Image: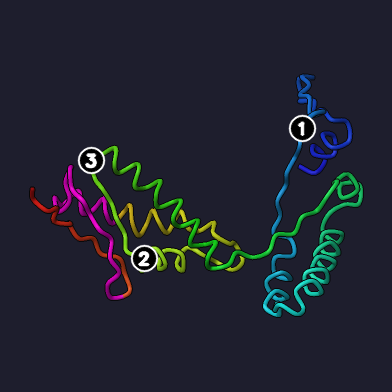
């Protein structure tokens, strides 16, 4: 992979085994890596309002050194900038949960089911779906397992049907679904 990327980064083009050329001259390439994630995790535990800049600068230097140990110099020398992201905070994780939960709500709405959730459920999903090393990547799997799979069982059993409002509530350390009675007019 590095040799292919070297050609792209060096020449601005990529040639396949049949001689076809793909042009990368006006392309921005963004690459991600978990290299140094352990350093970020360890060092950022020390962060406070007084040492923030010093800890971030020191950590960045350590991460760049780790990159030098794991990647060839000719590859690193072709990278214009290295951006080190800081770990997600609880507030940011909650925003991600809200966005992904809204996507689930839209999918269910198309099937005639309205899904609501308490703040406790959304916070619980954020806690279950966040991993300090991998960030919010596991969140989709948690939403699939805790919300979609369990709600599917409720639908198949007949407890939830079309034109229903369902609320996800936290109970006994897990998520439970309740049909919401709509006021009659």
Question: Is residue 166 located in the magenta-colored stretch of the structure?
Answer: yes
Q: How is the image coloured?
A: rainbow
Residue 105 point in image, percent of width and height: 34, 47
Name above or below for residue 176 compared with residue 116: below
Question: Residue placed at 35% from the left, 42% from the top?
Answer: 106
Question: Is residue 51 located in the magenta-colored stretch of the structure?
Answer: no
Residue 159 point in image, percent of width and height: 14, 54
Q: Which mark is residue 27?
A: 1
The residue labelled by disc 3 is: 112
Which is more N-terminal, label 3 or label 1?
1
First to last magenta residue range: 150-172
Distance between mark 3 and mark 2 Cα atoms? 23 Å
Q: Nearer the viewer, residue 38 or 109?
A: 109
Residue 61 point in image, percent of width and height: 85, 66
* Secondary structure beneath label 1: loop
Residue 10, image quadrant: top right
The residue labelled by disc 2 is: 119
Residue 184 is left or right of residue 133, and the answer is left
Contact? badges 1 and 3 (CB < 8 Å): no
Which is more N-terminal, label 2 or label 3?
3
Residue 66, image quadrant: bottom right
């Amino acid at each position: 992979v590095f040799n292919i990327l070297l050609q792209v980064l060096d020449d601005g083009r990529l040639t396949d085994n049949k001689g076809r050329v793909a042009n990368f001259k006006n392309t921005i390439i963004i690459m991600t890596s978990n290299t140094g994630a352990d350093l970020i995790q360890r060092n950022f535990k020390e962060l406070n309002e007084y040492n923030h800049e010093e800890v971030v600068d020191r950590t960045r230097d350590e991460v760049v050194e780790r990159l030098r140990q794991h990647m060839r110099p000719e590859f690193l020398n072709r990278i214009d900038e290295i951006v080190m992201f800081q770990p997600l905070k609880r507030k940011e994780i909650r925003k991600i949960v809200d966005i992904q939960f809204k996507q689930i709500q839209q999918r269910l709405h198309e099937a005639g089911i309205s899904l609501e959730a308490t703040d406790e459920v959304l916070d619980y999903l954020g806690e279950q779906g966040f991993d300090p090393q991998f960030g919010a990547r596991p969140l989709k799997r948690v939403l699939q397992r805790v919300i979609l799979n369990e709600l599917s069982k409720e639908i198949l059993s007949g407890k939830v049907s079309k034109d229903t409002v369902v609320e996800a509530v936290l109970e006994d350390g897990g998520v439970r679904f309740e049909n919401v009675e709509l006021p009659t007019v």
